[in-house]
Amino acid sequence: MKGAAWLVLLVAALLPAVQAEGLCVEQADGGTLCLDKPAQRIVSLAPHLTEMLFAIGAQAQIAAVVDRSDHPPEALKLQSVGSYHKPDLERMVSLRPDLVVAWKSGSPAAVVEPLRALGLQVLVTRGENLDDIPRELRALGRLTGHEEAAEGAAMAFEGELDTLRKAHEGKPVVSGFFEIWPHPLITVSDAHFIGQAMQVCGIRNIVGNTAQLTPTWSEEAVIRARPELLLISPPARQFERWRRWKELPAVRNDLLVIMPPNVLMRPGPRLIEGVRALCDAADLARAVQP
């Protein structure tokens, strides 16, 4: 009897620790964030993180978002705390969130650290490569109590990505350049999620690996590389700078392609739509290869 009572007490003592361990996720900096219970009041500091919360069924737990959180349309009805790089900290604190989700590339330390200093729980996500998307869906599911839905969303993304990868294995490689911004000319390296998406479709990024995920490039370097495909993502950009160079295969074959808005620039669930669009563009370029 004494032994049984001791066992009950031990289990009771360990239960909170076990529950807490189940609500722990890894931060982008390698640290760990743990919650005592699923978050019920969440502030999202990036549009793609808002999309992720909707994708896992946690939309009712969102207390506020940042500007440009426009997908799904219901997100437009949510309270905004300002821009992602400079949100209104006082307004955020007044909402009494039990979780703030931020993006390493979009939320500077000047935003994150004051929130942590005030005792708020802040998850900083990585959002740099394709594998981060299912990983962060699962992490958000764990912290919000929607693990099953998050697992489904993560597996759907992984499955569709694998299908696209297998469909383009062995196809002729197409050289390409992706323009993020025209002045200065900014592009992506192979390590960026867009660069990885290009690889899935059999597009050889003329930029390759660089020290930066989004390096500044030169027009001369693009011209020398003679890409077969020139890609741009909205907001609308102009192709005039490239149309001047008639000797570029991409210009000669009219393979200057505008990608669907937002889907390739946000490391969220809809990125798979952008990968499909990239693969379609690659197939167009293959069709005119000699």
Image (cartoon, helix red, strand yellow):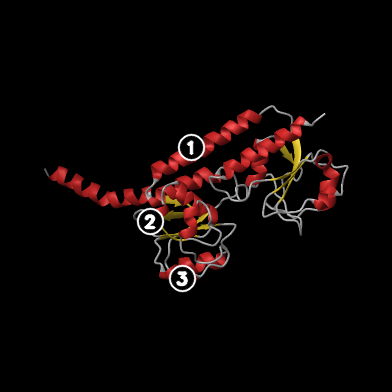
* Marks 3,1: beta carbons within 8 A: no
Q: Amino acid at mark 3?
A: Arg
| Mark seen at residue 175 | none
Q: Amino acid at mark 1?
A: Met
Q: Secondary structure at mark 1?
A: helix
The residues bearing labels 3 and 2 have C-alpha atoms spaced at a distance of: 19 Å
> How would you rate the neighbour count of disc 1 (Cα within 10 Å): few for under 14, some for 14-19, many for 20 or more?
some
Q: What residue lies at 51% left-to-right and 70% top-to-bottom?
A: 88
The residues bearing labels 3 and 1 have C-alpha atoms spaced at a distance of: 36 Å
The residue to which callout 1 is attached is 155
Q: Amino acid at mark 2?
A: Ala
The residues bearing labels 2 and 1 have C-alpha atoms spaced at a distance of: 23 Å
Quarter of the image that includes the N terminus: top left
Point out residue 3 in the picture as x, y percentages from the top left corner.
16, 43
Q: What residue lies at 75% left-to-right and 41% top-to-bottom?
A: 176
> How would you rate the neighbour count of disc 3 (Cα within 10 Å): few for under 14, some for 14-19, many for 20 or more?
few
Residue 87 visible somewhere in the drawing: yes
From the viewer's perspective, tell me whether residue 251 is left or right of residue 143.
right
Q: Earlier in the sequence, mark 3 or mark 1?
A: 3
From the viewer's perspective, tell me whether residue 206 is left or right of residue 101.
right
Q: Secondary structure at mark 2?
A: loop
Which mark lies nearer to you, 3 or 2?
3
Residue 143 vertical position relative to residue 202 in the rendered view, above or below: below
The residue to which callout 3 is attached is 91
Residue 174 vertical position relative to residue 31 in the rendered view, above or below: above
The residue to which callout 2 is attached is 39
Q: Secondary structure at mark 3?
A: helix
Point out residue 145 in the picture as x, y percentages from the top left corner.
37, 49
